[in-house]
Amino acid sequence: MTVSTPAADLDAVILGGGPAGCAAAIELALAGQRVVLLDRTLHAHHKVCGDFLSGEAISSLEALALNLPGLGAVPIRRVRLAGGFGTPSATLPFAAQSLTRRALDDALLRRASAAGALVLRGHTAESLHRSGSLWRVGVSGPSRTYTLGAQHILLATGKHDLRGLPRPAGTHNDLVGLKMYLRLTPAQIDAIQDTIELILFRGGYGGLSLVEGAAGRAAEGTRANLCIVIRRSQLRDVGRDWPAIRDSLSRNPHLRKRLAGAHPLLERPLAISPIPYGLLLRQAIAEDLFAIGDQAAVIPSFTGDGLALALHTGRLAARALLAGRSSHEFHAELYSQLRRQISLATMLSRALVRQPQRSMLSVAACIFPGVLRSVASFTRLASEHQVSAPPARTSQENTCTAA
């Protein structure tokens, strides 16, 4: 795609190169739309994320022509709960995989470019305003600033708000997200093969699973992802350096066993705050502005459906745009689809970080192992099957190019 001048009028400008933005860019470009995607970083990087791909996420990624086995994705077949009253486990009611966000985001950005979208890495949206029937985006690139004009804006900046356009607060806002990659001992690697562990501890919960490079027993280069959310008040008492966090987490007997002999692979934990769990926009922010991904909805991380939700919102927004539906109609449909799942997941997330609810849930899962499967089923994106395959590219030539 070529843009003859910096201010060329486009069909859509997508702000953000994560899963939501890339999914929308791929579908729009394949349908012959003139699309520019702005990603503020030059290279894909690790992010605070469980790196978990649910069945719905895998379905979307396969529809977008991503080769997950080729990227090194690790199969996940079981979920195990470690909450202080035993470690019940259950087979997941869907196929799942694990893949780092750095690998996934890079593959999606390359796929968006191959589909015909103009992907501008290292370019940041500095301003956004309406001018007549078009949106104008002030862009800062590595060497200059310029303006893009587009009929539609897709806001896909993740948990980072665009200046002057903050999201509403969620309904569960007192959590901080932390992430550390670890090299576990061979015995601990064997213990979590094919499994994601949901671990409950005082003031928070986390997920532990292997990521790419984990094929075979104790494979060289095997990494595990420990991603946790913790109440802000609890973190203030602990501090943010890894040894202090590790010591605090090790009060949980299960985590103490997993972390014994584990080697941290990052200099310090990645962190993000606030996390607006429970956020779900009821209506569009403005005409022809589609909020997608975490800008539209944020589901608690224990569900493992954050990436599925991002991909779903991006694809659904692209379909709405191509069908000539308004951003208001898109958000009304999305709200109708997701309100039950997000409401239930947020209620459970509150319970997981507080006593005595946390203990009650843990005991229930030990007595009734089917509870784990039920929670995994009831928080799924039931509407994902409604998103069909991308429309074929039209014979119209894309003529967008960077100036």
Image (cartoon, rainbow, N blue to C red):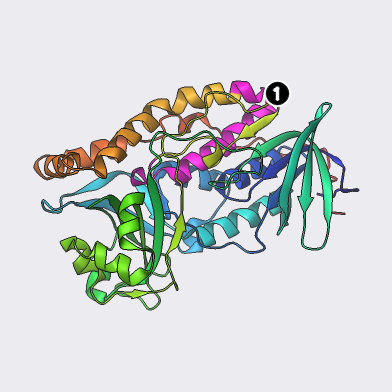
Give the percent coordinates (x, y) of residue 214: 37, 69
Q: Is residue 231 visible?
A: no
Q: Which residues are magenta?
A: 300-329
Residue 48 appears left or right of 255: right
Of residues 391 and 182, the one drawn nearer to the viewer in this rendering: 182
The residue sitting at 53% across, 46% down in the picture is: 159
**As drawn, which residue projects farthest toward the right?**
4
Image: 119 above or below 311:
below
| Residue situated in front as seen by the camera: 45 or 115 | 45
Q: Nearer the viewer, residue 127 or 348?
A: 127
Farthest residue, direction left: 367
Q: Quadrant of the C terminus?
A: bottom right
Up the image or down, 262 lies above or below 234; here it is below
- Residue 323 within the segment the image draws in magenta: yes
Identify which residue is drawn at 70% across, 50% down. Answer: 38
Whether residue 218 is situated above or below residue 289 in the rendered picture: below
Q: Which residue is mark 1?
A: 324
Q: Quadrant of residue 382?
A: top left
For the stretch drawn in magenta, the main secondary structure is helix
Residue 141 appears in view: yes
Residue type at tag 1: Gly
Magenta segment includes 319: yes
Residue 175 x %, y % = 38, 47
Classify mark 1: helix, strand or loop: loop
**Quadrant in which residue 97 is drawn:** bottom left
Q: Position of residue 112 (x, y in %)?
A: 66, 50
Closest to the observer: 261 or 161? Answer: 161
For the point 57% across and 37% down, which residue is it? 292
